[in-house]
Amino acid sequence: MIRDQETLNILLDTVRRFVRERCVPAEAVTAETDRIPEDIVADMRRMGLFGFAIPQAYGGMGLTLEEEVLVNFEMSQCSPVFRSIAGTNNGIGSMGIVIDGSDEQKLKYLPRLASGEIIGSFALTEPGSGSDAGALRTSARREGDHYILNGTKRYITNAPEADIFTVMARTDPNTKDASGVTAFIVERDTPGLSLGPIDKKMGQRGGHTSDVIFENVKVPATSIIGGKEGMGFKTAMKVLDKARLNIAAVCVGVAERMLQDALRYAMQRQQFGRPVAEFQLVQAMLADCRTEIFAARSMTLEAARKHDAGERIATEASCCKYFASEMCGRVADRAVQIHGGAGYMAEYGIERFYRDVRLFRIYEGTSQIQQLVIARNMIKAAGG
Ligand code: COS
């Protein structure tokens, strides 16, 4: 749903210019130094980009999901780490509180997340549980008005920068599945919480992940999201429904950028006396990219509109994340191919995108998990 097309156009234009003028020129230095320049992050704070998905009542822009997707199409036409630093605040680092949090929790954390004063992070994955998220083992033992958390979370995006974590932990030790899981808000400086070293990754340099370790971390019972034990897995899944649609939007944006670079290169690069763009085998690759991006863009917008109309979109979000991330991988591969030898060389940048986008088929649910969710929901809807 688009509430005010004119205002939205101004926002989209501003983001487009910011990406082109500030982020794209800083891509190489961000990858080399493994750090997004601080002045760019400061500009993002000033522009409200840390809180566009957070409700206006708490200082955010309160964008509808369709508007958010449109912003992500623009914000992602550069190295995906630029979106990622604010991405957890708009997505998995705040949405648990937005969707299921109490009024006190919303008032306490959302305004600071929206302004970018603090960074939020989402701690679900563990050394022994990734796709089987419900099997997590981090424990939260009740002691009076408090809970004591013990365990390790793994590959946690923005953990090194984070000030608060949404932590899924098992409050019912008699369960081994999703039913005994509760979501907590845990502040970074709580005694007993420590971080592992920053992970060395295939790509996405400038964005950081690490382990988050809990050793007898004592948190008040009021830090349970929504105040009720046993609801944490459902909160996590609701967060991921929305997050998966936004990852689909990010895949569309990055694919658009890779195709622009490939097209420009194909029109400049001369072989056999003419630009390689004039060869039909290259044209086929360009056309396949254009077609698949159009399909992913259309389905992502359609799912966002359904969500804004009040419908559940768990299946559609998985369809979009699955198709768009696989599409993005194919576009990256063709973009490298169109660049030929230059595609393999760091100075042209396309090999960096090729490595960066590999993550999209894995995080926030692998392609195989999306297939499983889609098929399970089909069977359930058919009465199975
Ligand atoms: N919204 C709301 N509730 C949901 C839901 C959703 N999208 N998906 C599941 N639930 C509910 C179910 O209805 C069920 O509740 P009831 O017991 O009351 O019926 C409960 O949550 C457990 O669901 P389910 O039985 O389907 O859980 P499983 O353990 O079988 O796991 C998968 C389901 C595999 C889909 C889940 O573990 C998953 O998404 N794994 C991937 C995790 C992931 O994306 N990790 C990436 C790291 S986060 S960046």
Image (spheres, rainbow, N blue to C red):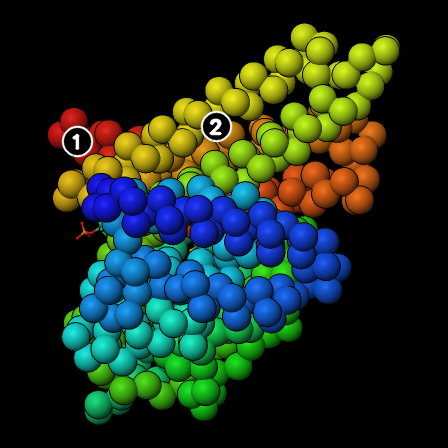
Quadrant of the drawing holding the C terminus: top left
Identity of the amino acid at label 1? Ala
**Position above or below: 271 against 12:** above
Q: x, y (%) of residue 283?
A: 64, 13
Above-or-below relation of 361 to 59: above
Give the farthest residue toward the top.
Answer: 280
Q: Does the residue labelled 1 lie within 8 Å of ligand 1?
A: no
**244 w.r.t. 47: above or below:** above
Seen from the viewer's position, the closer of residues 57 and 333 is 57
Sequence-wise first label, 2 or 1: 2
> Badge 2: few (under 14), some or many (20 or more) residues near its Cα, within 10 Å?
many
* Residue found 72% across the figure and 10% down from its top: 279
Percent across and percent down for residue 249 are 42, 41
> Residue 323 occupies which quadrant of the picture?
top left
Residue annotated with mark 1: 381
Amino acid on which disc 2 is placed: Ile
In this rendering, does residue 380 appear at all?
yes
Helix, strand or loop at mark 2? helix
- As helix, strand or loop, the secondary structure at mark 1 comes to helix
Specify the quadrant that holds the N terminus: top left
Q: Can you name the residue that lies furthest to the right here?
A: 272
Check if mark 2's residue and mark 1's residue have beta carbons within 8 Å. Answer: no
Q: Position of residue 114 (x, y in %)?
A: 35, 69
- Mark 2 or 1: in front is 2
The residue located at (79%, 36%) in the rendering is 344
The answer to whether any part of residue 174 appears in the image is: no
Q: Distance between the residues labelled 2 and 1?
A: 29 Å
Residue 264 shown left or right of residue 329 in the figure? right
Residue found 32% across the figure and 57% down from its top: 53
Q: Mark 2 sits on what residue?
A: 293
